[in-house]
Image (tube, grey):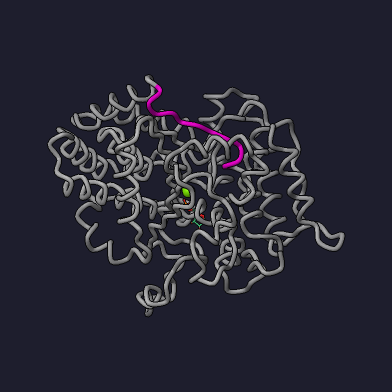
Amino acid sequence: NTELPDVLRGSYKGSFAYKTISERMPVILTKVIDLFHREKINIGNQYGDAAKEKLKQINGSLSELKSTMQRNKPLQPLAGAAADVPLWNRLLEEQWVDGEPPVWFDAPWLFVECYMYRRVREILENSGELRDYDYFGQQKRDTLEASIAAIELLGEHLLETVADPAALSGQQVKRAFSDFIGMSLWANKNDLSISAGAHVSQEASPLVQLVELNHRVLVNDSEQVFAQLRRLRDKRDVRIDIVMDNAGFELFSDLCLADLLTSLGIAQRMSLHIKAHPWYVSDTTPADVRHTLQHMQSADGKPALRRLAERWQGYLDAGTWVFEMDTFWTSPLPFSRMASEAPELYAHLQAANLIIFKGDLNYRKLLGDRNWPHSTGFCASLEGFHPAPLVALRTMKADLVSGLAPEREALTAGDPNWMVSGEWALIQLCECSDT
Ligand code: F6P
Ligand code: MG
């Protein structure tokens, strides 16, 4: 369709795509290479000598990947037996133009960025011994620990809020939603790929900053989201899905929101969609969930966290909460192609009463990573993706947006980096289907 705006590409000089491919992505790869140098002995101790011997080869492959990126060479097909390899190679073929293979800076930014993470995975996957090694694991664990004080405060606030759900007035329920949606939203500021893995943590509880931060929510559909939740309260067997993003403080905040929805009896089931392997540095994998729950349980002197960990484990054991994975989430596909490329996942999402999409990457995939005129309707920019009513919670870290009225955009005057700084945010609802 020629009328659609183009997708973002590194070939647009001055764009965040260009900056990402030329500056941010090489740094992320370098950090993985450095990690393998540094961890050689530990890896040898843990995974054996054969694994240690492979590190040289792994780092050779990683360096080559970095060099092809920096020299703008063609993207190579994937190899190996993983289930998603044929899909990747088919999508790679789609990118050929005039008989020429795609190169890093000309191909769609969304595609090449996902491709880099997938290639790193491939290098480890095909190494045998280290196939399950999480090269971003330490960074994620460090930020969890650095955020523990804020996590504790938020956990205590949650326990107080839901201590006696029946006693809460309508106003208090609304306030609780506003707080925990706000926390889940702003926790997205802390992803590790934007900082290229530089140390980030949530040092103070942003609960106290929420009022101030509210002014920075450029599109705020909270009222409509509350109305949706109120309607769901009268229904039975409600399932709410969260398509999750980063581990650490964000994962904890998202689980607090899930707890609120469960404790207030709005959702009887929560499907929590996470990544099957390391992705965009800080995205949540099953190992991160396990580590977070263990950390909460072991935390000395933090009874609130132990109580919550126990309760959440109970929800998981009972099937009230389910963590789910699908290779679609680690594909480069925009969500508008889910119905045709991952029909089972699409049908599964159709059974949800509300879907919450967290973070910047999910937002880019919702919008097909297109350069939409900013005032294009949010629903229109989803290009037909509407399995169920959906809400996006995103701090802005890439130069695209839809559904933004000019008078709201005017608020950002004076901040040239407003689209990518993570200082501005969106709560956008598309109610297109009535479930
Ligand atoms: O690098 C591209 C990007 O989408 C950034 O814009 C953002 O820093 C990061 O990846 C992912 O952010 P999030 O964790 O919010 O999806
Ligand atoms: Mg992320």
Q: Quadrant of the C terminus?
A: top left
Point 66% across, 30% down: residue = 53
Nearest the viewer among 269 and 14 is 269
**Does residue 323 belong to the magenta stretch?**
yes
Q: Is residue 197 visible?
A: no
State the residue lying farthest toward the right: 99
- Quadrant hosting residue 169: top left
Q: Is residue 382 above or below residue 62?
A: below
Task: Using the image as rendered, state which of residue 102 and residue 192 is in the foreground.
Answer: 102
Query: Toward the viewer: 379 or 180?
Result: 379
- Which residue sits at x=36%, y=33%? 292
Can you give x and y, in whole percent of width and height, for residue 124 in the image? 64, 35
Give x and y (percent) for residue 330: 59, 42
Task: Give the residues in magenta.
Answer: 319-329
Q: Residue furthest left?
A: 167
Instruction: Please state which of residues 44 and 319 is positioned toward the viewer in this rendering.
Output: 319
Question: Does the segment drawn in magenta span residue 3?
Answer: no
Which residue is pictured at 53% across the width and 31% down the height?
41
* Residue 211 point in image, percent of width and height: 22, 60
For residue 166, above or below residue 249:
above
Query: Relative to 396, does residue 41 appear above or below in the rendering?
Result: above
Q: Is residue 182 above or below residue 159?
A: below
User: Is residue 180 visible in this depiction of the protein?
Assistant: yes
Residue 60 place in picture, x, y as percent: 69, 44
As drawn, is 33 to the left or to the right of 87?
A: left
Q: Quarter holding the N terminus?
A: bottom right
